[in-house]
Every structure is written in structure tokens, then in C-alpha cells.
Image (cartoon, rainbow, N blue to C red):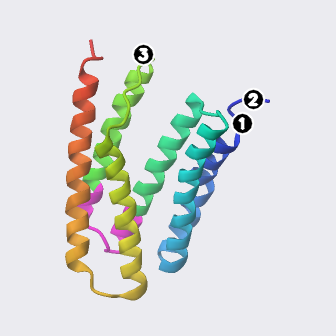
């Protein structure tokens, strides 16, 4: 059996190919289903990594698919939330620009067989993004005014995103020639 055709890689692939299009269809009609789908997709992200490590099924393909699936999922959700006016366009533009820049560096370095690990702020960025998405869905479902909390989360997320991107770039500089 091909070692790339394993459970963790399958979960990441399902998250990217099936979950995201269904999510995009639900965001415009039903916040509750979009939230449930987001939670399921987030859990597959958690479990694919745990399973890969536990079963010793970590592969280069899996690292790539997992990362791309996460970025597609988060960015697609933020674009959808922007379109329904739950999040500002400048925020989405900054996050997508940062992710594209960091992914570009990763791909360039990967072509030289160099891996620069994500920093702790990069992981915090992901947690903040997912927390913000849940908060925005909660607002969409309940209509409880969370403007101050939303603003704090938006600015915290974008600040951590920018700083983690800068740190990643600085860590990567030594590999450029």
C-alpha cells in the first residue's frame, strides 16, 4: 500500500475537497450548519495530526496537504464571512496576503529540501482565527451584540498573524542565497 494513502492524508483531503464547498453553500443560508461543519472540519484537522503521529504515518505529502487544507478552509470561511458583512475586507486581505507570502517561502525552501518549522505565534494565529470564526458564527446565530469582543479578536488575530509572518520570514532568511 502507498504510504501516502493513509487515514491522516485522507482526512486532510476530505477537509479540502468536500467540506469547504459544502461550507461555502451553508454560510449564506444557515449559520448553525456552517458552524457545525466548521467544527467537524476543525476536528479532522486535530485528528489527522494525532493519528499521523500515533500510527507513525507522517509523510511529506501529508504535511503539505494538511497545511494547504487549513489555509483553504480558513481563508474561504473568512471570504464568506466578509461577503455577508461579518468581517471587514481589510482583515481578509491581510490574512490572505500573509498566508500567501509564508506559503511562498515554504514552497521555495521545500524546493531546496529545507523545512523551517512554524513558530508558536503561527500556532496561536490559527487558534485565534478559529476562535474568531466560532465567535462570528455565534453572533450570526444568536444576534447577541458582541461588537467589542469581535473587534478585540479581529485586531488580535491580525496582529499575531503579521508578527508570526515576520518571524517566519526572519527565521527563513538564513536559507536564502
Q: Secondary structure at mark 1?
A: loop
Q: Nearer the viewer, residue 57 or 147?
A: 57
Q: Would residue 55 be counted in the magenta stretch?
A: no
Numbered disc total: 3
Q: Are marks 2 and 3 in contact (CB under 8 Å)?
A: no
The correct choice, above or below, for 54 with respect to 124 in the image is above
Which numbered dot is residue 2?
A: 2
Q: Residue at (47%, 49%) from the top-left corner?
A: 70
Q: CA distance from mark 1 to mark 2?
A: 6 Å
Residue under circle 3?
A: 112
Residue under circle 1?
A: 5
In the picture, the quarter occupied by the N terminus is top right
The correct choice, above or below, for 115 with respect to 86 in the image is above
Q: Position of residue 154 (x, y in %)?
A: 24, 64
Residue located farthest toward the front when viewing the structure as drawn:
54
Q: Which residues are magenta?
A: 78-92
Q: Is residue 77 visible?
A: yes
Q: Position of residue 43 (x, y in %)?
A: 55, 58
User: In which quarter of the view is residue 25 placed?
Assistant: bottom right
Q: Residue at (37%, 65%) from the top-left corner?
A: 131
Q: Are marks 1 and 3 in contact (CB under 8 Å)?
A: no
Q: Are marks 1 and 2 in contact (CB under 8 Å)?
A: yes
Amino acid at each position: 500500500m502507498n504510504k501516502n494513502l493513509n487515514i491522516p492524508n485522507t482526512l486532510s483531503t476530505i477537509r479540502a475537497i468536500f467540506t469547504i464547498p459544502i461550507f461555502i453553500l451553508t454560510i449564506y443560508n444557515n449559520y448553525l450548519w456552517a458552524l457545525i461543519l466548521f467544527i467537524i472540519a476543525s476536528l479532522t484537522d486535530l485528528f489527522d495530526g494525532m493519528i499521523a503521529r500515533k500510527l507513525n504515518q507522517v509523510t511529506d505529502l501529508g504535511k503539505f496537504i494538511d497545511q494547504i487544507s487549513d489555509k483553504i478552509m480558513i481563508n474561504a470561511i473568512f471570504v464568506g464571512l466578509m461577503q455577508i458583512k461579518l468581517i471587514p475586507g481589510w482583515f481578509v486581505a491581510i490574512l490572505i496576503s500573509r498566508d500567501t507570502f509564508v506559503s511562498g517561502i515554504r514552497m521555495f525552501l521545500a524546493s531546496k529540501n529545507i523545512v523551517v518549522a512554524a513558530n508558536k505565534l503561527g500556532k496561536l494565529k490559527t487558534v485565534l482565527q478559529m476562535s474568531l470564526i466560532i465567535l462570528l458564527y455565534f453572533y450570526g446565530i444568536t444576534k447577541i451584540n458582541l461588537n467589542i469582543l469581535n473587534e478585540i479578536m479581529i485586531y488580535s488575530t491580525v496582529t499575531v498573524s503579521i508578527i508570526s509572518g515576520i518571524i517566519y520570514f526572519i527565521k527563513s532568511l538564513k536559507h536564502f542565497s
